[in-house]
């Protein structure tokens, strides 16, 4: 029984406190309007009143003529009340900048258009390639087209380093399938010599690429950077020579391959939101000599599975000068 009495006393005291502090007032405005509600407090600039729906309304002090108790009509001074959580204006804290996602690895896919300064394969190798009978000229494009794939790591801010892989085709669009030459020999009579070549010429690149961002245009979401790549460069093409006559026929097939170290350098622009980028640069790829690998030979069986360096009529070794400029268009996406 004592317990119930104790709780009853607590309830009565609570109701009394609420009735004392929750004072109903009327607010008379300078324009004659009157607002009624629970008086919450006042500060230097604002009067706070809670209406019947529980909504807290704010009235500027300069527009209030008088505040008085709704029951006793006793005036309430327009002075700031004591410390009240309702009256405290929330502290304005500067917005925190969005945290940038930490990215460690990204993949890059590239399409390349290259333009050699001098197509030495067309100029020096092609006449030898068809055994001094260039009756069918090079009809392929002098430009190279290719695609690449990079895996780039970002060890520190504005620096990237990674694996560089590329493959290109030189001589696209050629309609040549080979050249035929008819010879006469006093022993075997007429015979036809034919060489078939494999166009386009193919190249591959495998190496390391380094990028350094030197300017961020934050308003346009564009980064500008420079890059350098170096590694192994390889050029190759297949061939087949065929002889047919009433008394004899045979063929020889193999590949022509050359290797060197390549260098690429230039500058690029990356759109950070769309993840597209463009690169322009220069390529140094000077193959000093080309080697012919004979895989099958029915003319002279002893030359099968042999190789030799290609030379011109003066005995000078033939190489491939593929120095030039290039334009890359690519897309990148982050993995980690």
Image: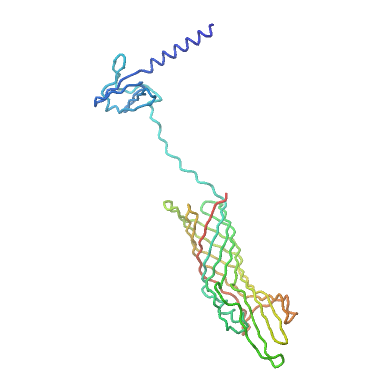
Name the residue at the right extreme: 302
**Percent coordinates x, y for residue 55 in the rendering:** 38, 26
Q: Give the number of marks.
A: 0
**Percent coordinates x, y for residue 46 in the rendering:** 32, 27
Along the viewing direction, whichever of 220 and 300 lies nearer the viewer? 300
Along the viewing direction, whichever of 11 and 184 lies nearer the viewer? 184
**Percent coordinates x, y for residue 35 in the rendering:** 30, 23
Image side of residue 33 versus residue 90, left or right: left
**Percent coordinates x, y for residue 170 in the rendering:** 56, 71
In which image quadrant can residue 56 be found?
top left
Q: How is the image coloured?
A: rainbow
In which image quadrant can residue 134 be found?
bottom right
Q: Which residue is drawn at the image coordinates 54% and 49% (left, top)?
A: 103
Image side of residue 116 versus residue 310, left or right: left
Q: Quadrant of the N terminus?
A: top right
Name the residue at the left extreme: 31
- Residue 170, above or below 224: below
Q: Which residue is drawn at the image coordinates 60% and 84% (left, top)?
A: 133
Name the residue at the top extreme: 1
- Residue 35, above or below 160: above
Q: Which residue is drawn at the image coordinates 27% and 27% (left, top)?
A: 63
In which image quadrant can residue 247 be found?
bottom right
Name the residue at the front extreme: 246
Along the viewing direction, whichever of 104 and 255 lies nearer the viewer? 255
Along the viewing direction, whichever of 285 and 297 lies nearer the viewer? 297
């Amino acid at each position: 029984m004592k317990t119930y009495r104790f709780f009853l006393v607590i309830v009565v005291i609570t109701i009394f406190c609420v009735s004392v502090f929750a004072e109903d007032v009327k607010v008379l405005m300078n324009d004659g309007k009157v607002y009624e509600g629970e008086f919450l407090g006042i500060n230097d600039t604002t009067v706070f009143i809670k209406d019947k729906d529980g909504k807290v309304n704010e009235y500027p002090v300069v527009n209030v003529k008088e505040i008085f108790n709704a029951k006793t009509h006793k005036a309430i001074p327009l002075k700031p009340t004591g410390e009240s959580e309702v009256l405290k204006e929330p502290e304005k804290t500067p917005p925190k900048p969005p945290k940038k996602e930490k990215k460690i690895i990204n993949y890059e896919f590239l399409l390349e258009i290259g333009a050699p300064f001098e197509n030495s394969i067309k100029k020096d190798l092609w006449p030898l390639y068809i055994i001094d009978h260039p009756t069918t000229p090079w009809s392929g494009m002098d430009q190279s087209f290719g695609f690449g794939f990079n895996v780039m790591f970002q060890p520190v801010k504005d620096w990237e380093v990674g694996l560089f892989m590329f493959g290109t085709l030189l001589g696209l669009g050629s309609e040549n399938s080979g050249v035929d030459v008819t010879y006469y020999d006093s022993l075997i009579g007429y015979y036809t010599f034919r060489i078939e070549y494999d166009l386009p010429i193919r190249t591959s690149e495998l190496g390391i690429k380094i990028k350094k961002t030197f300017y961020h245009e934050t308003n346009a979401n564009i980064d500008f950077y420079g890059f350098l790549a170096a590694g192994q460069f390889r050029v190759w093409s297949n061939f087949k020579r065929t002889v047919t006559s009433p008394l004899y026929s045979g063929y020889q097939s193999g590949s022509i391959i050359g290797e060197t170290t390549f260098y690429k350098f230039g500058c690029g622009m990356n759109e950070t939101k769309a993840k597209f980028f463009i690169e322009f640069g220069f390529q140094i790829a000077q193959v000093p000599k080309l080697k012919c690998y004979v895989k099958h030979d029915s003319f002279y069986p002893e030359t099968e599975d042999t190789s030799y360096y290609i030379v011109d009529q003066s005995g000078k070794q033939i190489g491939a000068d593929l120095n030039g400029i290039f334009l890359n268009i690519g897309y990148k996406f982050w993995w980690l």
